[in-house]
């Protein structure tokens, strides 16, 4: 018996030929894709023999989305840090809130983020950095239990600055190098490889919060363990000023200097970089996570995505966090990424919809070292698959499924989510957790956190709420 048989209208395979199969079907067995092709050819072998059939006849079937930059615990901090640039945004709002979180607060916030990602089609994500006060074990176990696939980084630090700003980090988030490094290795030994869905990475904080010695220790240990590293870099001009002043190196040059380049590294943002740095990223096969909504909202700038892609850099997509984006909808992020490039380059062909979908699927999988496992709908790969309902005025007539996903679809058009061959969401109902309870819990925890931190107790809006 086949576990699952998906009968779609369009199947965007992302295979080597990038074939789109009209009236296409996908057969899944033991979590693995067994067959992909025309329904007329596969029905005789699979129709009536599957445990479950998903009727996606008015849907686009495509690989699950890969979000390469997520702050799980920021899910309940939306609208709490508006109208600020990055460093005051962090110092005055985001870090005081996170520094006052209890482990229960962090779990409620992280669970909210997980639910939102599932409901908008993300099946795999890269968490940028948990800390001890969040109770990382419980969060990792919740990620596993709701059914997501994830590389989860643990923050590592031994200083308290951010670029040119000394002692920027909130006291509630400060950890020693020994503490943060040791706990990352503990989590790796406990969880890495769990059911082929959970991986533990190193998440060094930005330059100014990590010493040269610790950066190099992280690089060495990650190579020894065969795992990844992710770090924010060159998000704002302050990064360039600090690194050139203190080390005589531009941001990507500095990363290379301390060992944080290579195929196991995902550098996040990379807005303020030069042609030489783009070449260095390409030459070292270093991955980049582009976060267009965050960079736009904080006024940080527009990353040179088109230039990086043309140079051969593996550029991926990320949503970042609640206070810098206000949602975790990677489909929305696709459109913003595309429009920013065409507008900034004054070229409607700067990037194509096909490029953007690659960034959200195969390129994301490659950045996490999972390109042979996920990212496309091909026999032998894990069944991480979503269906997008196009039977909606904004997506009709269905002239071009690729263009419509990037320029017209929203996350709430996702109907079904399959991860590791298991149906995690069906007809927009999540099957692995009680969504209503998640929303009730996070509302209560948010109120308690805002009161404790003295932040966000009243909305920061000019119009009166009466």
Image: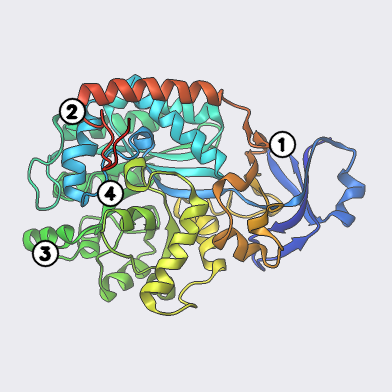
Res. 135 visible in picture: no
Q: Residues within 10 Å of mark 1 (few under 14, many from 20)?
A: some
Task: State the residue at coordinates (32%, 23%).
Answer: 447
Task: State the residue at coordinates (41%, 25%).
Answer: 442
Query: How far is disc 1 from disc 4 in space, using C-alphas?
Result: 36 Å
> Is tag 3's residue or tag 4's residue first in the polypeptide sequence?
4
Disc 3 target residue: 244
Label 3 or label 1, whichever lies nearer to me, is 3
Query: How far is disc 3 from disc 4 in space, using C-alphas?
Result: 21 Å
Marks 2 and 4: in contact by CB < 8 Å? no
Q: Residues within 10 Å of mark 3 (few under 14, many from 20)?
A: some
Query: How far is disc 3 from disc 1 in space, using C-alphas?
Result: 52 Å
Numbered disc 4: secondary structure: helix
Disc 4 target residue: 219
x and y percent of residue 178 in the render?
19, 32
Disc 1 target residue: 30
Query: How far is disc 2 from disc 1 in space, using C-alphas?
Result: 44 Å
Query: How far is disc 4 from disc 2 in space, using C-alphas?
Result: 26 Å
Label 4 or label 2, whichever lies nearer to me, is 2
């Amino acid at each position: 018996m086949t576990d699952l048989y998906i009968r779609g209208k369009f199947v965007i395979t992302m295979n080597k030929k990038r074939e789109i199969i009209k009236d296409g079907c996908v057969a899944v067995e033991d979590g693995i894709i067994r067959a992909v092709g025309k329904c007329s050819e596969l029905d005789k072998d699979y129709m009536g023999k599957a445990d479950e059939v998903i009727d996606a006849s008015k849907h686009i079937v495509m690989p699950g989305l890969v979000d390469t930059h997520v702050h799980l615990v920021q899910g309940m901090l939306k609208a709490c840090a508006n109208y600020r640039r990055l460093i005051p945004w962090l110092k005055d709002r985001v870090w005081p809130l996170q520094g006052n979180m209890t482990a229960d607060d962090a779990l409620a916030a992280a669970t909210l983020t997980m639910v939102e990602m599932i409901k908008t089609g993300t099946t795999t994500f890269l968490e940028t950095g948990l800390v001890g006060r969040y109770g990382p074990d419980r969060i990792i176990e919740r990620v596993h239990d709701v059914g997501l696939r994830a590389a989860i980084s643990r923050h590592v630090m031994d200083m308290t600055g951010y670029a040119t700003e000394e002692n920027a980090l909130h006291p509630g988030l400060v950890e020693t190098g020994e503490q943060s490094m040791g706990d990352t290795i503990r989590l790796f030994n406990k969880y890495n490889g769990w059911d082929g869905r959970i991986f533990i990475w190193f998440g060094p904080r930005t330059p100014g919060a990590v010493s040269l010695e610790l950066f190099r220790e992280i690089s060495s240990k990650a190579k020894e363990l065969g795992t990844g590293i992710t770090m924010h870099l060159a998000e704002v001009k302050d990064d360039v000023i600090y690194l050139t002043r203190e080390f005589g190196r531009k941001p990507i040059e500095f990363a290379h200097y301390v060992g944080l380049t290579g195929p196991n590294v995902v550098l996040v943002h990379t807005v303020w970089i030069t042609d030489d740095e783009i070449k260095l990223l390409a030459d070292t096969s270093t991955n980049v996570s582009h976060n267009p909504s965050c960079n736009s909202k904080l006024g940080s700038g527009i990353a040179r995505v088109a230039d990086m892609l043309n140079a051969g850099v593996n550029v991926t997509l990320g949503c970042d966090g609640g206070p810098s984006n206000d949602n975790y909808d990677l489909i929305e992020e696709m459109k913003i990424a595309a429009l920013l490039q065409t507008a900034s380059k004054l070229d409607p062909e700067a990037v194509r919809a096909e490029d953007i979908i690659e960034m959200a699927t195969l390129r994301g999988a490659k950045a996490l070292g999972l390109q042979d496992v996920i990212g496309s709908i091909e026999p032998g790969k894990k069944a991480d698959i979503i269906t997008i309902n196009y039977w909606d005025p904004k997506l009709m007539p269905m002239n071009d499924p690729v263009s419509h996903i990037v320029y017209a679809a929203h996350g709430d058009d996702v109907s079904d989510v399959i991860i590791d061959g298991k149906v995690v969401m069906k007809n927009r109902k999540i099957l692995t957790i009680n969504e209503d309870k998640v929303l009730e819990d996070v509302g209560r925890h948010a109120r308690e956190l805002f009161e404790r931190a003295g932040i966000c107790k009243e909305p920061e809006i000019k119009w009166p709420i009466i």
